Amino acid sequence: MLLSNAVEIGRRLTEAKELVPHGEWLKWLTESVSYSRCTASRLMKTFRE
């Protein structure tokens, strides 16, 4: 269950990153979710793999 949740969060973060204008990702990340850049990257990597 934990892995499936991580994959789903990674999927949603990946989709959000595609929608955010270039150069605005870190700003959006800090304003919109409570994940650090490192955590968000790991979740997105989990989704991709």
Image (cartoon, rainbow, N blue to C red):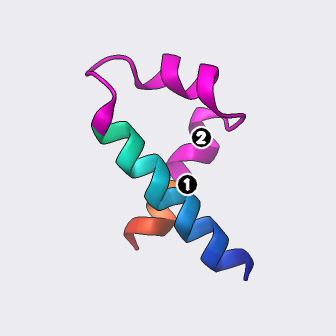
Span highlighted in magenta in the image: 19-42
Q: Position of residue 46 (x, y in %)?
A: 50, 67
Tag 2: amino acid: Cys
The answer to whether residue 45 is above or below residue 14 is below
Quarter of the image that includes the N terminus: bottom right
| Residue 29 placement, left or right of 45 | right
Residue pictured at 55% horizontal, 28% vertical: 29
Residue shown at 72% from the left, 34% from the top: 34
Asked if the magenta segment contains residue 24, the reply would be yes
Q: Is residue 13 above or below residue 20?
A: below
Location of mark 2 (residue): 38
Disc 2, SS: helix
Q: In percent of the image, x 56 and y 45: which residue is there?
A: 40
Main SS of the magenta part reads helix
Mark 1 → mark 2, Cα distance in angstroms:
6 Å
Which residue is denoted by mark 1 in the rendering?
42
Q: Which mark is residue 15?
A: none
Query: Can you tell which quarter of the image residue 33 is in?
Result: top right
For the residue marked with disc 1, what is the amino acid?
Arg
Q: Are marks 1 and 2 in contact (CB under 8 Å)?
A: yes
